[in-house]
Image (tube, rainbow, N blue to C red):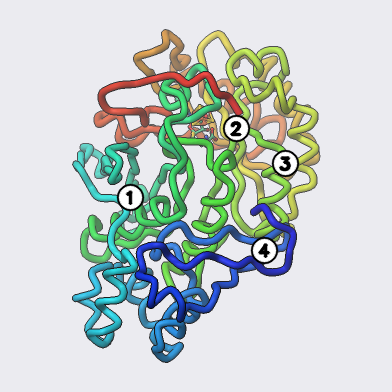
Amino acid sequence: MRSSTDEKQVEPSDRLDCAQTQTLAPLRVVKLPSDTLLAPSHPIARLPVEWEQRVVAWGEPAYRGKQIFDWIHRQGVLNPDEMSNIPKRLRELLKEDGVGWPIEIVSVHESADGTKKLLMGMPDGEKVETVLIPQLGDERLVTQCISSQVGCAMGCVFCASGVAGLKRQMSDAEIVAQVLLCRRELSTGQRIRNVVFMGMGEPLHNYDAVARALVLLTHPEGIDLSKRRVTVSTSGLVKQIDQLGKDFDGQVQLAISLHAVRDEERSRIMPVNRKHGLKELTEALRRYPMSKRQRITIEYTLIEGLNDSLADANGMVELLRGIPVKVNLIPMNPISASDLRAPDSSHVTRFQEQLTRRGLSVFVRKTRGDDVAAACGQLAFHGESRRTAGRE
Ligand code: SAH
Ligand code: SF4
């Protein structure tokens, strides 16, 4: 989202030869309230209107564009040869255009509780993880936790991705393909009902790709997730929280990684707080446009001796006063790079009770899939891990 002009011209794909290129009409990219959605990075990140323009430029009727979008996003078919109602000439053009998977499943580890962790590989050799979590009590409904970056630049000390540092951004197509691909891993009767950006990476540090992914994930002619069932979790990038609110009218579920209620402590464990302190963050939450029934999710990783005192619980109540929230307490999952750990469970319960007594609605997030290191904050590189100097 960069230009403030009404429409942006997009160069035709350089995969096409010159003769075809001359016949292509320029694509117009889609408008969002705050700005213009960046052009798709890959054919599978195109929206129906963009496909229509593309096929018309190829001399085919516009309705073919919708058919192709349907194959990719509704049916999860990316091999043009399997698109049975698409004529052969157009299938060949799709192949030349690069329609195909931008990411593949490298391995699947299933946990005793039914949670599946999938390692996904990209053509440049980078890997990310995504997790499928069947709902307790109704396994047909699955929550998918997806990644938005390879690594993360934000450097939170309790998080494996943060310790590893940012390797690169993920593209819009790579982000969405995690969902398209994982639908194939579901058992009969299961469906992905919720998608949470709680895998590797800080989604709002990759705003343009994530914004297009959000439009695609919730597109009624495609995957068609309800916006309320897509959660963007952030460590607190204030400008982008405002932008997200504006672009999606507050309908995308927002989760904030709070983890400490005083600036001094939060800055110590989350470097982002040195740039956007708690006052600035809570002001952004108060501005986030939401319907009366919506709540912002507050994630709070409980770390023994660091943020788990009753004074912290009381501080949280004061800090969040007047903001519609629900609080998720996450006993810290251990990571190899740190000695920090969760308090014992009776302490977690006391912390929860204090918040509840003071009027907050609080859940303790049950750790799922921890026997395959699939729990929150345990997603990190396989093999080499590195730290980058660049922070936000
Ligand atoms: N970068 C985003 C989303 C990915 S992290 C964010 O920080 O919000 C998803 C959630 O897992 C965040 O709330 C994060 O703080 C939490 N988390 C990270 N490491 C953790 C750990 N070791 N134990 C428990 N939760 C952790
Ligand atoms: Fe990045 Fe989130 Fe981990 Fe912090 S908690 S390092 S923002 S992935």
Residue 253: percent from left, percent from top: 59, 51
Up-down: is 61 above or below 115? Answer: below
* Residue occupied by mark 4: 32
Is the residue indicated by label 2 positioned so its CB lies within 8 Å of ligand 2? yes
Q: Which of the two labelled residues, at mark 1 and mark 3, occupies the earlier sequence position?
A: 1
Residue type at numbered disc 3:
Lys
The 10 Å Cα crowd at callout 3, few under 14, some 14 to 19, many 20 or more, is few
Q: Which of the two labelled residues, at mark 2 and mark 4, occupies the earlier sequence position?
A: 4
Measured Cα–Cα span from mark 1 to mark 4? 33 Å
Residue 74: percent from left, percent from top: 36, 72
Measured Cα–Cα span from mark 2 to mark 4? 23 Å
Q: Is residue 308 left or right of residue 6?
A: left
Q: Single out the mark in the foreground, 2 or 3.
A: 3
Q: Is residue 352 left or right of residue 241?
A: left
Measured Cα–Cα span from mark 2 to mark 3? 12 Å
Q: Which of the two labelled residues, at mark 1 and mark 4, occupies the earlier sequence position?
A: 4
* Residue occupied by mark 1: 134
Element marked by disc 3: helix
Element marked by disc 2: loop
* Residue occupied by mark 2: 235
Is the residue indicated by label 1 positioned so its CB lies within 8 Å of ligand 1? no
Residue type at numbered disc 1:
Pro
* Residue occupied by mark 3: 239
Residue type at numbered disc 2:
Ser
Q: Single out the mark in the foreground, 1 or 4.
A: 4
